[in-house]
Image (cartoon, coloured by chain):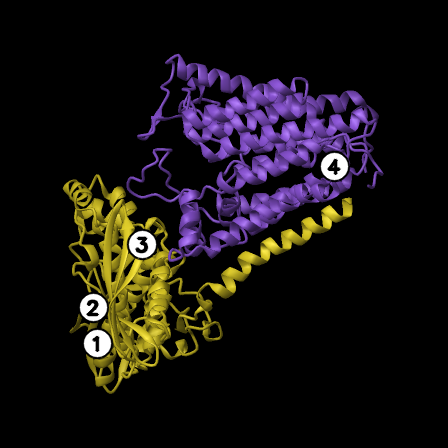
């Protein structure tokens, strides 16, 4: 009898464990692969990062010179900003909240927002790197002549305060301005850049002066300054930094309602990668920058979706915006993607369906009120999302 | 290797370490209980030296943990046999639970694990007497304070559900239910009629004043079990036989927690908002199926658990704003504490059933089944303030060795 109790207890314990494992591995949306790149076998980095600014700049110039967008992107502070950008501090310092014009906050360690920020930043950096690659490839010969401190001569207290503020907002340890001197077909040019240090490693923040704003701007101009020696960049040929961006896989579902259910569940699970992979994609243009730009649009649409849900209570939003500096913590909590747990999906209504297109309405409850969102679907060898509207 | 001094092994040393454990247990019970009340505790104000006790359910203080570890080490040192095996086993359990707690943050399970480990070779009757007296007195004091107006007797919602000084009406009802179970375990059948009347009165009281269906139903079940068990034993005694529970009943009651856990999970996973039957069942279970299903779908199962920020409505009965709460002990166990802790818990209840049978503690088997039923709807099984019965996993039940029926 005693043995029977123990054996049955152990068997039932095993059954109990198998049920969740079975549900998690098999039932839950078939373990969809959402990322095409980087796969595990494509993680080919040879070093974690550069501990000095000069090496990073030389690495960047080498890869830009060789039109290697992939490796150049890896030198930019994409993952770092996505991980450490503090909206709370930004609001406290600037007194402004710009909605989806900015990347989402990293204050709540949200996996969803990390993915969105990565997609948005990688597209912005790809844009600026495309400009630089175009400029450098237009020239016959490119030589890195010198790297100098780019701190303005008239830098005062405000300059250093701005640097400190930016470090605080970006969660970086240090921020430095550098002037890169390049010789393009014999012409001496100066490329200004701002570097940020996270942990022990430097990454590129801007390719312009600190006084300017925006990632997509390039500050490259002619200069009369002369230098005797040049810096050899070919030694960075074998260096590969860790991958900090992704390319989505093209996923679809055979049934439109199943697609809607999975898409909404992905949003609730903060699995933005899979949610984005359900969007309609046209990767006919295989240029990396174009792919990243399309991913940016999807990420922006999902960020908008999250913000529309979380900031749906207009009275509360008005109260937060009325004293933004003091309510910054409240704003960040409101925007936390973990709030998706409190959404109650009420029902899904079919608006119209034909062979190629469909329109569905999702009705859900949040914060004690009812809302709906309309999903436009397209059928191209499987159903995908073409757009989402509130 | 240093020899263990003989004096450390003698009875006096065993008694001292037992008293140390019971003192620590008493302190933990008092503060765990007070944590569930709305009584103002002056020494728990910010800056107070004992504030850590008050806060231990959300963040267990390091030195409270160390004190318990020290007592456990002294207890192990005083063991007469299997000292090394028990030490090794304790270290493994402690390390596993500690690691899970570091990930999921629910350190009340660490406290429970330490108390279970430390209860080895201490009389469970002694532990239960201390627990029942402590929680009984505290509940009476809390209720008195609420009724005399010392603290507010908070009423919730339109149905005016009363909490009698406890944080929420269902919490109050759960305290009453577990206290009744403890009283039955400790004092048994001295006055069976009084015992049944008291239990049924308690059921009526919590249902009428607190509208707590689950605890009321469990109290009615408890009164039924008291009568059944009493007359079964009496029948055997009259026939000069020792009462032995039906083997099927023993096995069923021993694994009742497992069955309840599996049933709860399967039912919650199968919940479909388009199914009428499921919707009716969900309404009967006051939306627990829908919330559990949402929890499983969104949070998923993790081996070491995860922090889930739940928002309850504190018994108001009407959902205002955001609401998400996993009421079931089994869903909290698998989703929040993780699958590893779930396995350990189920294994512990298996041992509990086994030991209850071995020591002919039929009441404990019935209590295990009541815990199983209560756990389907409420989250009390892992809280020391409500349920002390997991300590029977290692405490001394007075087994009958070598018995095989």
Q: Are marks 1 and 2 in contact (CB under 8 Å)?
A: yes
- The first of marks 3 and 1 along the sequence is 1
Which of discs 4 and 1 lies nearer the camera? The answer is 4
Q: Which mark is residue A131?
A: 1
Labels 3 and 2 within one chain: yes
Between marks 3 and 2, how big is the CA–CA gap? 42 Å
Labels 3 and 4 within one chain: no
Question: What residue is pinned by disc 4?
Answer: B245
Decide if residue B329 is on the left or right side of residue B19: left
> In the picture, which chain is purple?
B
Which of discs 3 and 1 lies nearer the camera? The answer is 3
- Image quadrant assignment for residue B88: top right
The answer to whether residue B91 is visible is no
Neighbourhood count class around disc 3 (C-alpha, 10 Å): few under 14, some 14–19, many 20 upward:
few
Between marks 3 and 1, how big is the CA–CA gap? 48 Å
Colour applied to chain A: yellow
What percent of the width, then of the height, locates residue A284? 28, 84
Q: Are marks 3 and 1 in contact (CB under 8 Å)?
A: no
User: What's the residue at 28%, 58% (across, down)?
Assistant: A176
| Residue projecting furthest to the bottom | A140
Q: Residue A216 carries which label?
A: 2
Question: What residue is pinned by disc 3?
Answer: A346
Q: Element type at marker 3? A: strand
What percent of the width, then of the height, locates residue B300? 46, 55
């Amino acid at each position: 009898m005693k043995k029977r109790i123990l054996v049955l207890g152990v068997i039932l314990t095993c059954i109990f464990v198998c049920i969740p494992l079975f549900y998690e591995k098999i039932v839950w949306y078939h373990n969809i692969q959402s990322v095409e790149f980087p796969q595990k076998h494509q993680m080919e980095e040879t070093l974690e990062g550069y501990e000095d600014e000069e090496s990073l700049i030389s690495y960047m110039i080498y890869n830009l010179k060789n039109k290697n967008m992939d490796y150049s992107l890896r030198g930019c502070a994409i993952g770092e900003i996505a991980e450490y950008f503090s909206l709370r501090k930004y609001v406290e310092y600037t007194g402004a909240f710009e909605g989806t014009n900015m990347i989402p906050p990293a204050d709540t360690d949200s996996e969803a927002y990390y993915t969105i920020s990565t997609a948005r930043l990688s597209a912005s950096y790809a844009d600026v790197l495309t400009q630089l690659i175009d400029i450098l490839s237009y020239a016959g010969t490119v030589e890195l002549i010198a790297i100098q401190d780019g701190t303005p001569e008239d830098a005062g207290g405000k300059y250093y305060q701005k640097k400190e503020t930016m470090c605080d907002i970006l969660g970086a340890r240090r921020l430095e301005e550098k002037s890169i001197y390049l010789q393009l077909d014999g012409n001496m040019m100066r490329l200004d850049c701002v570097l940020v240090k996270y942990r022990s490693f430097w990454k590129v923040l801007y390719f312009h002066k600190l006084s300017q704003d925006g990632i997509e701007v390039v500050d490259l101009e002619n200069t009369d300054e002369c230098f005797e020696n040049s810096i050899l960049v070919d030694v960075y040929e074998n260096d590969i930094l860790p991958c900090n961006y992704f390319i989505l896989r093209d996923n679809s579902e055979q049934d439109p309602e199943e697609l809607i259910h999975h898409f909404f569940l992905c949003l609730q699970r903060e699995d933005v990668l899979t949610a984005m992979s359900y969007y309609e994609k046209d990767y006919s243009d295989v240029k990396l920058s174009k792919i990243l730009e399309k991913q940016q649009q999807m990420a922006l649409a999902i960020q908008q979706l999250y913000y529309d849900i979380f900031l749906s209570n207009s009275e509360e939003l008005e109260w937060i915006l009325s004293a933004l500096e003091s309510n910054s913590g409240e704003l960040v909590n409101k925007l936390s993607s973990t709030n998706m747990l409190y959404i109650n999906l009420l029902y899904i209504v079919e608006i119209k369906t034909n062979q190629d297109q469909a329109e569905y309405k999702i009705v859900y409850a949040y914060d004690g009120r009812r809302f709906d969102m309309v999903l436009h679907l397209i059928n191209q060898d499987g159903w995908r999302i073409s757009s989402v509207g509130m | 290797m240093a020899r263990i001094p003989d004096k450390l092994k003698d009875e006096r040393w065993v008694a001292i370490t037992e008293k140390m454990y019971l003192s620590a247990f008493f302190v933990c019970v008092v503060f765990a209980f007070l944590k569930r009340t709305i009584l103002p505790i002056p020494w728990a104000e910010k800056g107070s030296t004992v504030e850590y006790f008050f806060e231990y359910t959300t963040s267990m203080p390091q030195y409270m943990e160390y004190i318990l570890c020290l007592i456990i080490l002294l207890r192990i040192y005083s063991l007469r046999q299997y000292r090394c095996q028990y030490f090794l086993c304790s270290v493994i359990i402690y390390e596993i639970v500690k690691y899970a707690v570091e990930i999921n943050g629910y350190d009340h399970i660490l406290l429970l694990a330490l108390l279970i480990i430390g209860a080895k070779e201490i009389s469970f009757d002694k532990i239960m007497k201390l627990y029942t007296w402590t929680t009984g007195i505290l509940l009476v004091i809390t209720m008195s304070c609420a009724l005399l107006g010392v603290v507010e007797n908070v009423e919730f919602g339109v149905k005016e559900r009363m909490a009698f000084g406890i944080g929420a009406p269902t919490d109050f009802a759960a305290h009453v239910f577990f206290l009744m179970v403890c009283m039955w375990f400790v004092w048994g059948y001295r006055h069976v009629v009084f015992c049944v009347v008291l239990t049924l009165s308690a059921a009526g009281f919590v249902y009428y004043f607190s509208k707590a269906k689950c605890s009321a139903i469990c109290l009615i079940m408890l009164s039924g079990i008291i009568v059944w068990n009493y007359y079964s034993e009496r029948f055997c005694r009259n026939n000069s036989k020792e009462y032995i529970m039906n083997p099927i009943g023993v096995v069923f009651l021993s694994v009742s927690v497992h069955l309840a856990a599996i049933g709860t999970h399967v039912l919650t996973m199968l919940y479909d908002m388009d199914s009428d039957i499921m919707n009716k069942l969900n309404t009967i279970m006051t939306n627990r199926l829908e919330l559990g299903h949402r929890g499983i779908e969104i949070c998923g199962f993790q081996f070491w658990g995860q922090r889930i920020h739940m928002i309850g409505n504190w018994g108001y009965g009407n959902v205002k704003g955001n609401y998400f709460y996993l009421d079931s002990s089994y869903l909290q166990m698998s989703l929040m504490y993780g699958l590893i802790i779930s396995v350990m818990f189920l294994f512990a209840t298996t041992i509990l059933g086994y030991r209850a049978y071995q020591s002919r503690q039929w009441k404990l088997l019935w209590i295990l089944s009541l815990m199983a039923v209560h756990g389907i709807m409420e989250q009390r099984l892992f809280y020391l303030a409500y349920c002390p019965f997991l300590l029977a996993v290692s405490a001394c039940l007075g087994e009958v060795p070598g018995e095989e029926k």
